Each structure stands twice: as C-alpha cells, then as structure tokens.
Amino acid sequence: MVNFFSQLAMSLSGFIATIVLTRTLGQSQYGTYVVVLSVLSWVLIGGQLGLPQAVRKRVSEADDGNYIVSGAAVQFALYGVVAICLWIARPYFNDFMGIEATWILIAMLAGQLALGFVQMVLDGQHLVHVSSILSPIEWTSRSIVQIALVLSGFSIIGAFAGYILGTVVAAAIGAYFITIPNELPSRRDFYRLKSYAQFSWLGSIKGRTFLSMDTIILAVFVSHSLIAVYEIAWNLASLLAIFGSSISKTLFPEMSKLSSEGESADQISGLLRVSLAYSGLFIIPGLTGAALVGDIVLTIYGSGFEMGYYILLVLTFARLLYGYMGQFLSTIDALDYPDLTFSVNAIFVAVNLSLNILLTWQFGWYGAAAATTLSAGIGLLLGYHYANRVIDVILPVNEIAKQCLSAGIMATVVLVARVMVGDSLPVIGVLVIVGATVYFSVLLVLSQEFRTTVEDNLPFRLPVLSPE
C-alpha cells in the first residue's frame, strides 16, 4: 500500500506538471522534451546492462557478500564509458533530438543511474516502502522546479533542470537508508552479479522497448506535436497500471527470499496467484472509464489532445496485458531462472521492434499503438508458458471475472449519467468519482476475497465488511 500510494502521489504531481508543460511549452516543444526523455531511457540501458536487477536479486537473498559496493563500482565504470560515447557522438544525438541537449542528456543519465541503483538496493534489503517514497519525492521536486522555471520563462531548459534536480534529491535521501556491509567485496560478489546481469540486461531492454520503442520510431515518421499527444495518452494509461506494478515490486524480494531459503513452492505459487488477482484491480475499470470519458479527460492538456482518444484506449489495453505479463516474469526472476526470462524478453524485443517499424511506417501512430499491444499479448502468453514450467500457476479466473463484471455495471451507470447530465469537464470529474464508487462497491459485494483483503489491510474494523 505504501508503494501504491507513493506511485499515486508521484503520478498526480507529474499530472499537474504535465498540464503546465503542455500548455506553456506547446505541443511541439513538449514533443521535443518527450523525445529527449525517450533517448535518455535507451541510453540508460547501456549505463545499467542489467546491473540494478542483479544487485536487487543478490541483496535480497539470504547470503553473505557485499553486493552494494561491488555493484556501485561497476555502475560508476559503466556510466563513465557511456558518458564518453555520448559526448563523442553528440552531433548525431543533437540532430535526432532536434535540440543541442547531449550535455543535458549526460547529466540526466547520472541522476537516473544513481537513483535507480539506490532504489534497487533498498528493494533488495526489503525496504520497498522506503524505496517507493523516493519516486514521489523525485517527481514532486521535479514538478515544483519545472513549473517554477517554465513559468518564469526558462522554457524547455527549465523542464530539463527540474528533471535533474528531482533525481539528485531523491537519490541523496534514499542513500541515507542503505545499510552497507562491513566486509570488502570479493571476486565472488562480482561474479554472482555478472551471472545474473548477463541475462537480466535484456529485461531492461524489454521494459524500455514496451515503454518507449514506439516513441523512438514515431520520431522518424511523425511530427513532435503528434508525439506529444501520443505520450500524454501513454502517461494516462500508465497511471492506471501503477497498482499492478506496485504488487510486482513488493512481492519480488519476498519470493526471492523464499526461493533462496528453499521454502515450499506452494507459497510462491500462492503469492503469484494474489499478484494476478489484483494486477487488474484498477486498470480494468480504468480501461472502461477511458472508453466512456477519455475524450473529455484529454482536453485537460489543451486544445488538440482529444485526438489521442483511440490511442488512449489501445495503449491502456496494452498496459493491462503487460501488467499480467510482468507478474509472470517477476516470479520467474525471483525463482532465479533469468535464462527463461531472457528467452521471453528476446522474443518480445524482436517482435516489438519489427512490428513498430512495419506498422508505424504503414499506419502512423495507430500502427505504433497496435505494435505495442500485440507484442504485450505475445509476451503474456510466453510469460505464462515459462512460469508454468517452474511453478504451479493458478489463474484467479473468478476474481478477474468479478472485476470485469463490476466494471461493466460501473460503465452502465456512468454512461446513463453522462447522457442525462452532459459531458463538461467538471461533470466528467464527478462521474469519475461516481464510477469508482460504484465499481468498488459492487466488487465488495461480489468478491469475498476482495472483502477479506480490504478488511485485513484496514487499520480499523468496518461492520459492513464483517457484520458478524
């Protein structure tokens, strides 16, 4: 819950900052900002090469060793190599991004590498609640500085400055909570990090392929203005997916520890079932709500953004599929089978890249959205297949069906209300609250498991949940 509410706070602060940026910078400049961030996300992979995931895994295990210092040494060396390569190739990067910002890219890379490393160490030390708070700290700091500088006339440079400052502040705070072992790192520590990272690096590419391959390909075929609309639709879809990612992030170190201690596979299977049962808790009604009121919600960002309505629907469905896929792959990684996730990731990246180039070339941004969705569906099937090979996968079909039914009832109420009272932005805001209330109320009635989960996690007893 700490992770979820932290992600929610982060998303809300980013939501406000994005509205200011889109309305102040305009679609073209905001699109340029998005392209720079997309390039950063790919450069970030070269600066990590699976190292943070390896650090999280090894630190989370019941084992000796100083994986923090050894990991930090490797991370610093990787950053140095990538930074030099960026500086040498700066004319090409500046030309692609449409702005001379390679030096900014290098500074942003340093901040992101530091923050990502700190968060993974905290996750491995079972301090997910602390790690989770760093994201809203980063985004809130970033948003405040960005809004202040952009409104003061610093334009896109102010947006970049806020981005860098946010990562530095969050990384510094997170580093305070890390416990570093007293012993010096050994050759074995470096070897065990390498043995995991050599497979997990492709997981980073898989994640980045899903998150921004379409944006990179779009930069070749469409204007920065359309990229801005596409990115806004993607951000809204991602907002609905944060609960599923919170579950995955929280359960990974617990599964990893159980696996390293040789505990019963039934316990891990039970945790996987729980993660699947609740992965779609918010995004299933979110997809329904996007179909009903997404066109009006997009107008918050300014004139012209409503054209991303259908893109929003496709990308939200893609996030739903990818969320379930992530639960399977996270479990496989926790069980220490990185070679299996490597296979899934390799196929996912190849399919996503091929489809993005082909479909974007032929159908523009609709093709990019379709490519993202199709690759997520293929990855989901592969993730289920490989997870079922190493553990008994129990699909919570009944719980997912109840979530879909509750979303359907919510849709009926919201649709009737929209027809009766209109569709102005303030009215839509009220309908969103009404829809959420209806959805969770119906789900509480339909699902005993959901009622039990809510009751177990509330700090007080509600008679309506347990009238006996």
Image (cartoon, rainbow, N blue to C red):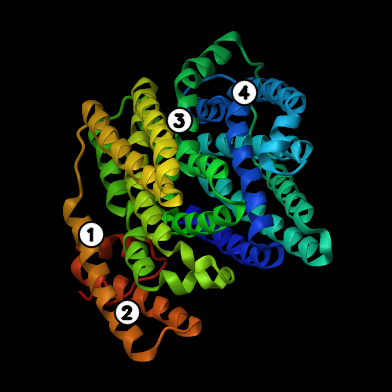
Counting every numbered tag in the picture gives 4
Q: Amino acid at mark 2?
A: Val
Q: Amino acid at mark 3?
A: Gly
Query: Element type at marker 3?
Result: helix
Badge 4 or badge 3: first in the primary sequence: 4
Q: CA distance from mark 4 to mark 2?
A: 51 Å
List x then y, in percent, for residue 84: 75, 23
Rounded to the nearest angstrom, the CA distance separating label 2 from label 1 is 26 Å
Q: Residue 110: in sight, yes or no?
A: no
For mark 1, give the secondary structure: helix
Q: Which residue is mark 2?
A: 414
Determine which residue is flagged by label 1: 449
Mark 2 and 3 residues: CB-CB less than 8 Å, in contact? no
Instruction: State which quarter of the image contains the N terminus.
Output: bottom left
Query: Disc 4 vs disc 3: which is toward the camera?
Result: 3
Q: Earlier in the sequence, mark 4 or mark 2?
A: 4
Vertical relation: 318 (above or below) 389: below
Mark drawn on residue 203: 3
Q: Amino acid at mark 4?
A: Gly
Which mark is nearer the camera, 2 or 1? 2
Q: Which residue is mark 4?
A: 71
What is the distance, in whole Å, between disc 3 and disc 1 at their CAs? Answer: 32 Å
* Res 152 seen here: yes
